[in-house]
Image: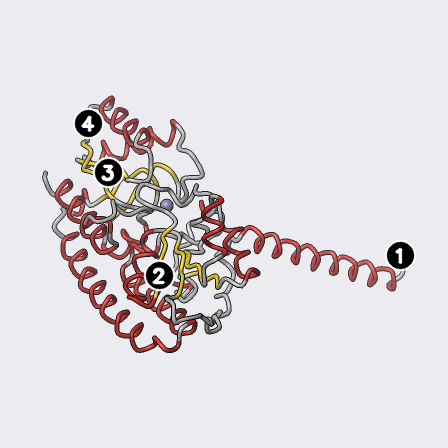
């Protein structure tokens, strides 16, 4: 083979490699998954929204935690509709026809974006083409502060609302997007966001202090799925979820046995059920622990990906966080 042919061959390989990389990038964009190795997406600043008769901005939010933040920051200037109510699992949620109609007539949709809304990320991505501002509230978070567990296939852990400091950054992103869409309301949005962030910061201190009430050996949060890694990191707890980061994957018998062994050896007194995940898995862990001679109780129901019923304390973001830490501490500090 002449040297010319060799050069030609390597060029062909380089072109093929580039084409392959491009296809891989397109595939990632199409399924709405942000790979953990990607850099921060370019800041997308929405354009001001033109409205008749000074009507409120029409916003759709996916999970309750985001809807609650938009309501706090938006006040009377924004009409917010939350898609996912109490008990709804965002990992598995698919948009209904009426959701899509509502999305299409909205000015903006606010969503998590870190593969949380796995079943509807395609729909959410497409909203931009229909003139609906599509805002991922996690875009402003420094990527070095996001967790990228290897078992979640290189994507980031989306449950960022459990690190209250990170969630403040999401609230800032919501504020900035509202200001960009409705500049006349800038003062209001700034004041509302500052007040809400101050409340979040106060609760952050409370959670930290309460977590310390539990003896370190049993300061372990065992739940149905791995939603609490940010919570554990920030507040000095260990965390074990039966299912993975997403409820898309199911737990095996081996997973149940392994978790039961861990609980029994540590002498952990309580495990927790989540309002948005069926409790059979946790029940199986309790039975497997009993078979090992260790009695473990259900410490209560906590809120992970969905908030509590509307009109209750747990139906708000601040209320669900307070409920969670109080429930966890009361159950684990009992012994
Ligand atoms: Zn989750």
Quadrant in which the C terminus is drawn: top left
Q: Residue furthest left?
A: 334
Q: Which residue is mark 4?
A: 294
Q: Earlier in the sequence, mark 1 or mark 2?
A: 1
Image quadrant in which you'd find residue 207: bottom left
- Measured as percent of width and height from the top left, residue 201 is found at 21, 65
Q: Nearer the viewer, mark 3 or mark 2?
A: 2
Q: Secondary structure at mark 4?
A: loop
Q: CA distance from mark 3 to mark 2?
A: 35 Å
Residue at the spot of label 1: 1
Judging from the image, the colouring scheme is secondary structure
Residue 145 falls in image quadrant: bottom left
3D distance between C-alphas at marks 4 and 2? 51 Å
Question: On residue 272, which mark appears?
Answer: 3
Quarter that holds the N terminus: bottom right
Badge 4 vs badge 1, beta-carbon distance below 8 Å: no
Mark 4, mark 2: which one is toward the viewer? Answer: 2
x 17%, y 47%: residue: 216
Q: Foreground mark, 3 or 4?
A: 3
**Total numbered labels:** 4
View quadrant of ligand 1? top left
State yes or no: discs 3 and 2 in contact (Cβ < 8 Å): no
Q: Quadrant of residue 110?
A: bottom left
């Amino acid at each position: 083979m002449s040297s010319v042919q060799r050069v030609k061959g390597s060029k062909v390989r380089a072109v093929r490699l580039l084409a392959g990389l491009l296809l891989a990038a397109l595939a990632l964009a199409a399924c709405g998954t942000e790979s953990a190795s990607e850099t921060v997406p370019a800041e997308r600043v929405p354009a001001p929204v033109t409205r008749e008769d000074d009507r409120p901005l029409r916003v759709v939010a996916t999970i309750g935690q985001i809807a609650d933040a938009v309501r706090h920051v938006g006040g009377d200037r924004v009409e917010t509709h939350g898609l996912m109510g109490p008990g709804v699992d965002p990992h598995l949620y698919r948009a209904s026809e009426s959701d899509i109609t509502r999305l299409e007539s909205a000015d903006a949709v606010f969503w998590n974006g870190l593969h949380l809304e796995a079943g509807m990320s395609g729909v959410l991505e497409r909203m931009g083409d229909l003139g609906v501002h599509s805002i991922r509230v996690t875009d402003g978070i420094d990527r070095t502060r996001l967790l990228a567990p290897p078992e979640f296939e290189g994507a980031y852990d989306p449950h960022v609302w459990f690190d209250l400091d990170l969630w403040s950054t999401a609230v800032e992103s919501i504020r900035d997007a509202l200001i960009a869409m409705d500049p006349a309301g800038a003062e209001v949005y700034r004041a509302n966001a500052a007040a809400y962030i101050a409340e979040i910061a106060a609760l952050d201190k409370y959670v930290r202090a309460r977590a310390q009430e539990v003896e370190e050996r049993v300061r372990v949060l065992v739940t149905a799925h791995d939603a609490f890694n940010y919570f554990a990191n920030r507040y000095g707890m260990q965390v074990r979820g039966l299912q993975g980061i997403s409820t898309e994957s199911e737990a095996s018998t081996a997973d149940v046995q392994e978790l039961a062994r861990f609980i029994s050896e540590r002498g952990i007194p309580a495990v927790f059920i989540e309002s948005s995940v069926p409790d059979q898995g946790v029940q199986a862990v309790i039975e497997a622990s009993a078979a090992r001679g260790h009695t473990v109780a259900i410490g209560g129901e906590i809120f992970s990906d969905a908030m509590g019923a509307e009109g209750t304390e747990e139906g708000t973001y601040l209320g669900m966080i307070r409920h969670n830490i109080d429930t966890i501490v009361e159950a684990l500090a009992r012994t």
